[in-house]
Amino acid sequence: MTQRVFVTGGASGLGRAIALRYAREGAKVCIGDINPEQGVGVEQEINNAGGEGYFVECDVRRLTDLEKICADLTQKWGGIDVVVNNAGVASAGSIEDTTMADWEWIIDINVLGVVRGCKAFTPQFKKQGSGTFVNIASMAGLMLAPLMDSYNVSKAGVIALSETLSQELRGDGIHVSCVCPAFFQTNLTNSMRSDIPGIQQNVNKLMKRSNISADHVAEDIVRSVKNKDFWVLPHVKERRMWMLKRYAPWAFDKLMYEESKRWMKKMGGKAKA
């Protein structure tokens, strides 16, 4: 059966990689994005890769955009199988320096954007008796490094929502996957907000050092949907750190504090011994 997939933020980065991965399986893939020029280009890439591409302008800050897309795809394709709530932005800064405007900006996109995606498509999934939400969170929401306050909170919110919906919607035949990658090469810093000098360059360096690509993460996501896995944790080292946090929190706390001092120095913050 041909998969019908919708990806927010699908015109670049991880969203594009997910769209093209599904396209290679012959899927019908709709990408929603605020960048029409890039979106039309990726629509063609989906077609070239063997799928059926469809671009729609979409701002996840507007519930009406997502509700219209759900109605459109239901009419066009007869339903939808996978909704990837991928659109997101980044920020960095301490509790003292991050403005309330930046807190509201990132929560509106990273948390409420996912909430809106789930809210808009849940009624259709329930009518079908099936469907999958893939919510893109981050290891930042599990590991909680300093100087990433608002970003960490936003991604932890996505994790909390995903765990809640996994229980709430399972009886309706709806599966939820929660994706928590660490650093990998993407364009996340393009929209990053921070007052820390050189933060974008430092984060880009960490991304470039990673041996995990957006294509690797996309592969793990497609596998998780097929296997109905909840957690998608592509990075081995960070996955082990998370296990340590769960089963030996005292050891994790000590290790994380030492790691945090190095992180804060690298990111330009002031760490106290």
Image (spheres, rainbow, N blue to C red):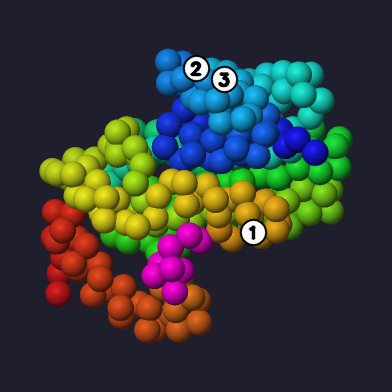
* Residue 54 image offset from top left, x and y in percent: 61, 21
Name the quadrant of the N terminus.
top right
Between circles 2 and 1, the one closer to the viewer is 2
Helix, strand or loop at label 1? It is loop
Q: Judge by depth and name the residue closer to the eye, 161 or 2.
A: 2
Q: Give the mark nearer the N terminus: 3 vs 2.
A: 2
For label 3, the crowd category at 10 Å Cα-Cα, with few meaning under 14, some 14 to 19 and many 20 or more, is: many
Describe residue 60's horizontal placement relative to residue 209 as left or right: right
Q: Residue at x 54, y 22 (%)?
A: 43
* Residue 108 image offset from top left, x and y in percent: 47, 34
Residue type, numbered disc 1? Phe
Q: Which residue does the numbered mark 2 point to in the structure image?
A: 40
Q: Judge by depth and name the residue closer to the eye, 206 or 161.
A: 206
The disc at residue 55 is 3
Q: Please determine whether, in this image, residue 261 is positioned above or below residue 95.
A: below
Q: Which residue does the numbered mark 1 point to in the structure image?
A: 230
Residue 182 at least partly seen: yes
Residue type, numbered disc 3? Phe
Q: Give the mark nearer the N terminus: 2 vs 1.
A: 2
Q: Main SS of the magenta segment?
A: helix
Residue type, numbered disc 2? Val
Q: Judge by depth and name the residue closer to the eye, 150 or 33.
A: 33
